[in-house]
Image (cartoon, rainbow, N blue to C red):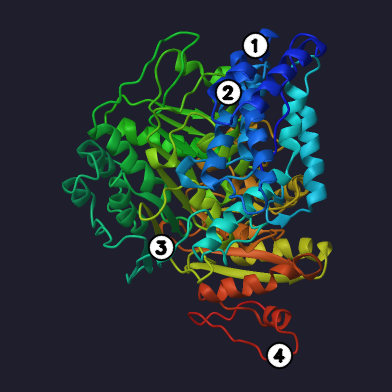
Amino acid sequence: TPQRAVAAPAAPAADAALVVPVADAAAAAAAAPAAQPGAAEQLMQAAMAQGYTAEQAQLYAHQYMQQQQQQGGAAQGAGAEQQPVEEKKEERMALYASTPQILNIDEGRKGQYRTTLKAVMFDTNNGRRSFQDVFVKGPWRRSKEEALKDQSELSEAFKYDGKPGVDKRLREIEDIEWRREDLKDIAASAAAVGSADNLEEDDFDAEAESDPEPEPEFTFSHEELPVKVRGLAQPEGPIQSWLEGMQRGFIAPAVGQALAAMQLQRPTLIQRYALPMIGRSHFDLLAQAQTGSGKTLAFVIPIVSRLLMNPPVARPFFPGAMAQASPVALMLSPTRELAIQTSKITADLVLAAGSSMSVLTMYGGETLSTQVKPIERLNQDIICATPGRLLDAIDSGKVSLSFATVVVLDEADQMMDLAVGLEGTVTQITDGRDMPRNDGRQTLLFSATMPDYQTKQFHSVLKSRPSRVKLRVGHYTEDEKGGSCRHITQTIVPVRDMDNRWERLGRDLMEMWGSTTQRREGKGIMFTNRIVLAQPLESALRRFGITCGQLHGKQTQDVREDIVKRFRKGEYEMLIASNVASRGLDFPDIRLVVQFELPKTVEIYTHRIGRTGRNGQSGMALAYYWAAADKRLAKPLADFMRLNEQAVPGWLEDVVNPGGSRRRSRSRGQRGRR
């Protein structure tokens, strides 16, 4: 398909002054043979004489000569050969590379423009095709008209009055059909070798890399849980003790001694398998394990050990107000509380190992200037952060990721979830700033739940096969459902309406947790979807004689930190929380989790009940089911309970299979509530 010729950029001088000499040069170029080098030079000289920069003149000459050649080729008949796809690709990448010289705008907007222009062309990074997310919005396709409208709105954002050449260049970006022609060319080339059947014109969601062969997969049986390893031809044997980890070079001696001093007797199952895989730093890891299984230490231990055992990385650093940190390791978390917890676990291990390694925590809710103060004195080796705050620090020049060798995405499914809104920020950090490409760093993804529909998103930040490994510990279905412990006793109670829910709450708490005259065992967390219910719930619990506090996103950061600290100390028996506390937070001695309102998905349900039953302990989970709002969760809940060998109540079976035969499920003699 012929390429679209781009109009020459407007000269800084009046347009009329440019017409005659350039037109004369164009006529001379058209009369000259195609191979004559002087034709292009005449065009360049004429354009430069009228105020064009050398880059602008060169681009104009190149485009004009190309247009003349295309017109000449069209006149020769339909038998002329099309320009090879690879040549067109190179020309467009050259056009992209010339953009900064043509645009006379500020650096920040220039970076946005380059990213947008690059997206409508080809990206040679990792040999993949890269397309701007114009025709696809999340999992939903949009029409061409909607896409063009969005692109037009995007173009408006780049308009600067009086800036030469900008408007004409913007019209080039708006030509979305350009991209469709590229796809047709690719399809034609693929058809020539008999491989075009799997390529559709609008298939922008298709993975760039194909998996012609299934990945090697190994399943190991343990007394505790099943373990599955995928992607390794020969899996690395798990470690059985901290001592073995030191002997095999995965754990630094100082870290091994620190673990013993912290009274951690032996590694958990996820730690036994993950440490050797992370220790072989050329592997990226996608690790999935049930809640409360020790995933945080599974990546903290090998990262700290590596930094202690390897020679220090030479990084430039100049103390003072203009100092910039260059961390070697980066640990990203979706919530502030989880970032603080991860930082504390890391700092405690570093301190116990007797190291002077620096660990910095960055999260929203506090001023950036306060959090970057430590950078003025000392370069930071490890940064634990939330994505948004880290991006602020990078764009303000306080943090550079150019020396990062390992990056961790904790709670990866939430980090890469389009609905949560973090995916774009994470992508900007991993691909849009100065972090090394995925083949130049080690990337570790951890979570209890990793839905199958997010697989492509996970793979986008990992190395390609065979340098990525998937590790799964626990009971999961084939479509990755699961992630909870079987020793958490789950109880689902049906309610008629909100009034019935309030009536049941006090009675159920006394039955499962103890009355005011009885000694309650452990602490509890109560989840609600709506923050407006937090205060009424606190008042109701206090009437029941239960001390409690609230934790939700509407509170200031200092209040949230104070609530968490007091709950850890035992000043509160019950914590009333929104989804802020549903992921990753490890509170000691949680005996009961109550879901006053069920969440939207079974994945959130999994993480909520995972606040209890941690590290092999038993726990209880109570949830209220209201058919008017929760019917969509009936089948996923029933399947989840069966997966974890829980008794599925008869009424829930009837909801899932109305008028059909019930699938009776019994575990350890439990009957469940009817």
Residue 441 in view in this figure: no
- Residue type pointed to by label 2: Asp
Q: Nearer the N terminus, badge 2 or badge 3?
A: 2
- Residue type pointed to by label 4: Gly
Q: Nearer the N terminus, badge 1 or badge 4?
A: 1
Indicate the secondary structure of the residue bearing disc 3: strand
Residue 615 location (% of width, % of height): 41, 56
Residue 428 in view in this figure: yes
Q: Are marks 1 and 3 in contact (CB under 8 Å)?
A: no
Residue 369 location (% of width, % of height): 57, 17
Residue 505 location (% of width, % of height): 72, 62
Q: Nearer the N terminus, badge 1 or badge 3?
A: 1
- Residue type pointed to by label 1: Met
Q: Residues within 10 Å of mark 4 (few under 14, many from 20)?
A: few
**Res. 48 mark:** 1
Q: Residues within 10 Å of mark 3 (few under 14, many from 20)?
A: many
